[in-house]
Amino acid sequence: MQYAILCYHDEKVVCAWSKAEDEAVMAKLTAINERLAREGKLGPVARLLPTTAATTLRKDRDPPLVLDGPFAETKEQLLGFYVIEAASLDEILAIAKELGAANPGGSYEIRPIGYFVDGSRPG
Amino acid sequence: MTDQAWMSAVLNAARPRAIAALVRYFRDLDVAEEAFQEACLRALKAWPTNGPPRDPAAWLVMVARNSGIDHARRARRHSPLPDDDRAVSDLSDHEGPAVERIDAADYRDDILRLMFICCHPELPATQQIALALRIVSGLSVAQIARAFLVSDAAMEQRITRAKARVAKAAVAFETPGTVERAERLATVAAMVYLLFNEGYTVPGPGSDDKSALADEAIRLARLLLQLYPAEPELMGLAALLLLQHARAPARIDANGEPVLLAEQDRSLWRRPLIAEGLALVDKAMRHRRPGPYQLQAAIAALHAHSVSAEETDWDQIDLLYGALERMTPSPVVTLNRAVAVAKARGPAAALDMIEPLAVPLTGYFYFHGARGSFLAELGRTSEAREAFGRAISLARSPTEAAHVRRELDRLSQTATAG
């Protein structure tokens, strides 16, 4: 089963990290990612730019409305995601806990994936 | 990251919102700050055991109000505290409906007001910046003193004076109207830009402390943009700072000497900052309401896009500077434009463009430096030498002078070779 781990955190806190703190977190996460990749479990991983860089398309009307900023104003924002192959909820939870220990604060939402197209692989 | 580092990051992030709400409540910077400090101390005790609250800023405001009220009473202030319909009577450290009500308050205008208070027009720019760093960003007096290369005592005095001056100023605490809000935003944006420039430095003592100012300016620019996400000039400001700051690692060489844009190793530029800056420029353009920050950001974006100085779209930069000149006429803008013109249309056109600047910029280092290089390119060697000599006499630092001396050396080599 493929899972998405959606990473939520207060971006004000993450943006307040010093460059050194940010790099330390990224180094720990990269180590875990590399292991998952060797085990053939790692799909796409993305870190998103701050929500100030976001644009929202409200498509519930015609023509759609283009708005500056994130879709919803929340205390914690979607800052990134992982796609990971895991055999069970227990396994993906264990992986999420490991990632979480390297990157404290915030929450991970774990969502099983129903449909996935790996655009990077032709055919 | 340790628990303590994480806690201080949370407290730091919550600070502008919390202080802003407390200033509205107490109408006094010192009381608000003191109350916030106490709330932070209680947070450091309570959070490790109880876990962090869901909304740290609201938690801090509530606890700070509780402790701050006592201080205000002790100080027997002349002005009575405002009646607040959201008054929290039975305060506790626990989150509850009261927290939600505080949170519902319009904190956008609170934060803008707090930053605006620091920009009082009677305060010289350096005091505005120092006050904003102390009050909004929460930097210690010692940190600010290091960045400004003055003693702690001198900075303490400067901040105390600035606070006293703004305390006397009547700043409206009512929700600002549209025009007033726009004026406040423009003033605050200018202060953030000044703060960034203060941190944009040449190498030397205190350069790390200075560079912290640039980080802080970016944080404030992002904060403003979070509060007012559809303001294209705020997108432009944030983009400008991000794109310029992205070049910081390439601006200084291994010997600590400054490196000109044309000679920088562009692989050292910080790509995530560039990506964010470019995204913001794109977003701003969509509004078709150009302004000075957007134009400068667009110029910086063209540099960020180019793999080298030669590959840069100098025609487009010339056009953008032309638009900037019309919007904010200034000899320095024209001088910058001339540098692009020299690349796009040749040194003769650039020289024509700057001739009228000879009087207004007669004491300006960069004018004579640029004029010297245009003349050198045209082969007018003795005039170029004269201009470079004038630039050296106006240099404000040995590194500036050294840079022009290299130009002079190059001139002699070309003359010998020719």
Image: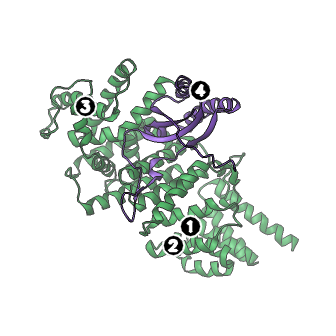
Nearest the viewer among B110 and A10 is A10
Q: Which residue is mark 4?
A: A87
Mark in front: 2 vs 3 = 3
Q: Quadrant of residue A99?
A: top right
In the rendered image, what is the letter of the chain coloured green? B
Q: Quick check: marks 2 and 3 in contact, CB under 8 Å?
A: no
For marks 3 and 1, give the CA distance.
Answer: 52 Å
Q: Relative to B418, say whether B117 is above or below.
A: above
Residue B70, above or below B133: above
Q: Amino acid at mark 3?
A: Met
Q: Is residue B148 visible?
A: no
The residue that mark 3 highlights is B62
What kind of residue is marked 2? Answer: Pro
Which chain is in purple here? A
Q: Residues within 10 Å of mark 3 (few under 14, many from 20)?
A: many
- State the residue position of label 1: B364
Between residues B353 and B42, which one lies in front from this camera angle? B42
Q: Choose mark 2 or mark 1, whichever is in front.
A: 2
Label for residue B399?
none
Residue contact at pointers 2 and 1, CB within 8 angstroms: yes
Q: Amino acid at mark 1?
A: Tyr
Mark 3 chain: B
Q: Is residue A54 above or below residue B382?
A: above
Q: Position of residue B39 (x, y in %)?
A: 31, 28
Residue found at x 61% / y 52%: B247
Marks 2 and 3, the one that precedes in the sequence? 3
User: Vertically, is B191 above or below B404?
Assistant: above
Viewed as shown, does residue B380 lie left or right of A93?
Answer: right
Quick one: label 3 or label 1, which is nearer the N terminus? 3
